[in-house]
Image: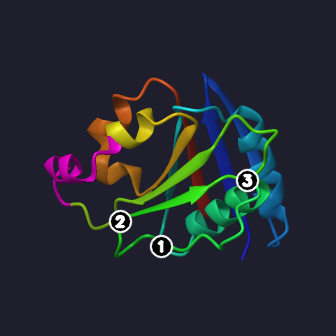
């Protein structure tokens, strides 16, 4: 099943068609070209759209050795970056699907996590924590639609 990936960054949009698994590399490469520490990448899409798959390609291209897993039950997973050419030193992968109230974010210390040097936060289901996402100045929104 193909996907239409719309990336919204600094008032511009880029659309990438994903027809096969390897096309996720193009999406990850584009995001990496825009990514910088302190940034939030908000991944929107239905269940099974490819949010975790995209995160796997992002961390892989940053030289992370372990495979990115969905943080659905853990809510947050951390990946240390080994690509010395990148300013990004750590990816914090958040799955907000099970968050019912934004006050639950306090226990996760996401603001604190994001302030750590070299950190980029990738958030699945950002609509569940829309107020927090809107408060972030530097963000990329990625909307993944099944075709």
Say if the magenta span includes residue 86. Answer: no
Camera-near label (2 vs 1) is 2
Compared to residue 21, the image places residue 99 above or below, namely above
Magenta segment, which residues?
Answer: 100-110
Camera-near label (3 vs 1) is 3
**Residue 49 drawn at (x, y percent):** 58, 69
Residue 44 relative to residue 35: left or right: left
Q: Residues within 10 Å of mark 2 (few under 14, many from 20)?
A: some
Q: Nearer the viewer, residue 76 or 46?
A: 76
**Residue 46 drawn at (x, y percent):** 48, 67
Camera-near label (3 vs 2) is 3
**Residue at numbered disc 3:** 82
Residue 138 relative to residue 133: left or right: right
Quarter-of-image position of residue 135: top left
Which label was assigned to residue 47?
1
SS for callout 2: loop
């Amino acid at each position: 099943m193909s996907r239409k990936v719309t990336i919204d960054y600094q008032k511009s949009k880029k659309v990438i068609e994903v027809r096969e698994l390897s096309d996720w590399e193009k999406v990850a490469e584009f995001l990496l070209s825009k990514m910088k520490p302190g940034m939030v990448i908000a991944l929107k899409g239905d269940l099974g759209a490819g949010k975790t798959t995209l995160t796997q390609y992002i961390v892989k291209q940053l030289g992370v050795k372990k495979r990115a897993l969905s943080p659905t039950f853990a809510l947050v997973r951390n990946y240390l970056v080994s690509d010395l050419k990148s300013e990004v030193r750590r990816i914090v992968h958040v799955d907000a699907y099970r968050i019912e109230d934004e006050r639950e974010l306090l226990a996760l210390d996401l603001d604190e996590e994001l302030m750590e040097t070299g950190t980029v936060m990738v958030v699945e289901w950002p609509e569940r924590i829309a107020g927090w996402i809107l408060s972030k100045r530097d963000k990329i929104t990625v909307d993944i639609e099944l075709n």
